[in-house]
Image (cartoon, grey):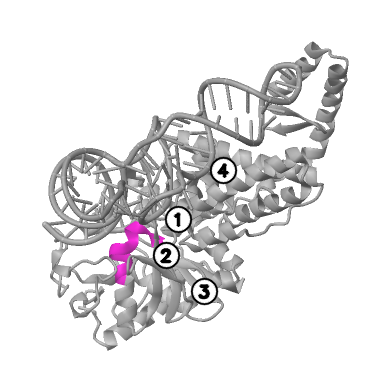
Amino acid sequence: MTKLASDLNLYNTADRAVSKFVPLEAGKVGIYLCGATVQAPPHIGHIRSGVNFDILRRWLTAIGYDVTFVRNVTDIDDKILHKAVHEDIPWWAVAMKYERAFSDAYAALNVLPPTYEPRATGHITQMIELMEALIANGSAYAPGNGDVYLEVRKLKSYLTLSNQKLDDLQSADDADLTFKKDPRDFALWKAAKPGDPSWPTPWGDGRPGWHLECSAMAHAYLGEAFDIHGGGLDLIFPHHENEIAQSESAGWKFANIWMHNAWVTTSGEKMSKSLGNSLQVMEILKKVRGIELRWYLGSAHYRSMLEFSFEALEESSVNFRRIEGFLQRAREVLKSEIEPSISSEFAKAMNNDLAVPQALADISEAVRIGNSAITENDLTALAKSASEVRGALSILGCDPFDPIFAGAANTKKELLDGLISLALEQRTAARARKDFAASDAIRDSLTALGITIEDTPTGSRWTVN
RNA sequence: GGUCGGAUGGCCGAGAGGCGAGGCUCAGGACUGCAAAUCCUGCUACACGGGUUCAAAUCCCGUUCCGACCUCCA
């Protein structure tokens, strides 16, 4: 596996190019992914990010890396506070409610729990320590109103990730220069307003600004330098620029490479709550299974926009069911569990900046070969292709034999199998005496119940739609 | 105004100088009592106008259209 690990290439937003991945420490990878601001239920754009980086994590693990994966929860921010007032419940109740909604969605799509999942409010101490250091070395200032700002003009490398110039930025209309030295200076810490939650600091009671938490938590769990920082494309500016500003001002090397996933769009526009075009994960899961939604969200390249439509989702699900059907047939024919393996084609695709679409083409090819092997009763060829297909699906988090997807349905499977076998025996007998009216009536009845019958050379098999 | 990205066949979606990605749909065929599943075959495109090249979807110049960030955003 070390050979595969040394062939991994990833795109780095910082230099806008794909290059060989070299870990800071041999055999280990530290990843920090900006997680959710828990102020509403997740829509499929949020969960796409989770799926994309889960695939990255699984691949890194598969090729032999010891991965530390940190995904934070932003549990304090303006929207959460507004919602708390609006719903007349405590701010922490809002945060916890939606944190759970995100956890449920991640679980439904088989996104592995992070190694660590820190909450912003649990790291106030680290944030204060960071601010103290920044003020001590002259990077930040506390003007006395309870806010703490970072002085961005002092930084040489500010805005290098987004390739912008400070003076080219559109001027904010509401820039208040009463306390800020420069309108671009951003708040590390915000003074408490009446009724808002606050924490004591040397500069007065207040709460964290959005950007500070990620620098503090990434540092706490991954150290002064780590390999990969991830997030959505829309976080490049200002969030990630500001993280870099804070962290580098503190003398930390911070992230080695930056990876950003693209959006899920509808009608060409980014899905977002404010546009009113967002589709909640749990709503879509009423139409397709979690494994199918994951297959769909993972099928486009992570840096490409994914134009959502229910038609495309359904097409994708049809494609997945074909692959799933192959694995189930393969298991029946082989009369044994399928051992996952990684084909060289799949590895090559994944090592090329996670070229999942190419990997999918390879999977389709393997399925075709495997299906032909079933027809020709070539068990050796079947075992090989089934193994590769399952291995690939496993990395993509879509292994149909994964217990997380098998669900509770299994408990009644034996009973169901017995009942349907009974009906199929009747049908087989009818077909044997060429009483096709009777055999078709049985099949039609089963079809009406959502059970599909397939006649194979070795007998009839059934599947639930 | 600045920065970044996009336009590919009926649909989704890769690729990024030359051997037609793949999937879905559709049509035909094989198999089947008929189906289903599977396999085979067919339909074969790169927004527009120039240019470079033996060769351009891919490189260069120009144009049009769409989107994102610069306020909270995955």
Q: Which quadrant of the structure image shows residue A138? A: bottom left
Asked whether A405 or A378 is in front, the reply is A378
Question: Circle 4 sits on which residue?
Answer: A292
Question: Circle 2 sits on which residue?
Answer: A230
Q: Which residues are magenta?
A: A230-242
Asked whether A82 or A28 is in front, the reply is A28
Query: Where's the N terminus of chain A, which quadrant?
Result: bottom right
How far separated are the C-alphas under marks 1 and 4?
16 Å
Circle nearer the N terminus (3, 1): 3
What is the number of the mark on residue A49?
A: 1
Amino acid type, label 1: Ser
The answer to whether residue A65 shows anywhere in this view is: no
Question: Circle 3 sits on which residue?
Answer: A29
How far separated are the C-alphas under marks 3 and 2?
13 Å
Would residue A306 be counted in the magenta stretch?
Answer: no
Question: Tag 3: Cα neighbours inside 10 Å, few (<14), some, or many (≥20)?
Answer: many
Circle nearer the N terminus (2, 1): 1
Amino acid type, label 3: Val
